[in-house]
Image (cartoon, grey):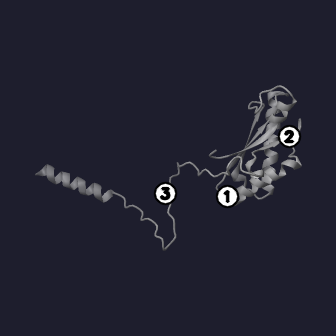
Amino acid sequence: MKKLMLALAMTGALAACSSTPTPAPTADTGSKTQASNTNAAPEALFPAKGVGGALGQRSVYYDFDKFAVKEQYAPIVNAHSNFLTSHKAAHVTLQGNCDERGSREYNLALGQRRADSVKKLMMASGVSANQIDTISFGKEKPRNPGHNKAAWAENRRTDIVYRGE
């Protein structure tokens, strides 16, 4: 009998400690509830690659040994800036790249200046600094493995990469 009473007492104690589920939102209030999981990955939010216009393009190209964004690439930077300002949960990493010429250290520094030049333009358009990360890959991630002018031109770039892609 003592064992039965002990088991009932334990069951009652455990039931008292259980949590009550949060009620589902009702249609008349229009409110939404979210589970707060601090370990959850941020929501992936990005425009589709290859969509028409500047928003579908993800790279800004540079002349040899330069990091200023050329006027012809301003529409791409502006399109992504507009997307980011209208989607505050979106986040990009700007990846600066160089061609194979030059030392590793020089190319890492130049790649960083390229990524930073795009970041400055985006921030001037109202994008929050919290939405942008920059990194330089220098000559370590060539898009074109060739060793000629065409390959080098393709490798001198900043790639716009959205979180979740």
Picture coordinates of residue 149 (x, y %)?
87, 30
Marks 2 and 1 in Cβ contact (< 8 Å): no
Name the kind of residue labelled 1 in the image.
His
Count of numbered badges drawn on the protein: 3
Residue that numbered label 1 is attached to: 87
Q: Residues within 10 Å of mark 3 (few under 14, many from 20)?
A: few
Mark 3 to mark 1 CA distance (whole Å): 21 Å
Q: Return the residue nearer the eye: 104 or 93.
A: 93
In this view, the mark in front (3 or 2): 2
Picture coordinates of residue 17 (x, y %)?
32, 57
In this view, the mark in front (3 or 1): 1
For image coordinates 86% across by 41% down, the residue present is: 67
* Residue positioned most to the top: 147
Picture coordinates of residue 45 (x, y %)?
63, 52
Residue that numbered label 3 is attached to: 35
Residue 138, located in which quarter of the rendered image? top right
* Residue positioned most to the left: 1
Mark 2 to mark 1 CA distance (whole Å): 28 Å
Residue that numbered label 2 is attached to: 62
For image coordinates 73% across by 53% down, the residue present is: 129
Residue 86, located in which quarter of the rendered image? bottom right
Local secondary structure at mark 3: loop
Q: Residues within 10 Å of mark 1 (few under 14, many from 20)?
A: some
Going from N to C along the chain, the mark reached first, 3 or 2, is 3
For image coordinates 49% across by 57% down, the residue present is: 35
Going from N to C along the chain, the mark reached first, 3 or 1, is 3
Residue 140, located in which quarter of the rendered image? top right
Local secondary structure at mark 2: loop
Name the kind of residue labelled 2 in the image.
Tyr
Mark linked to residue 73: none
Q: In this view, does 1 lie to the left or right of 84?
A: left
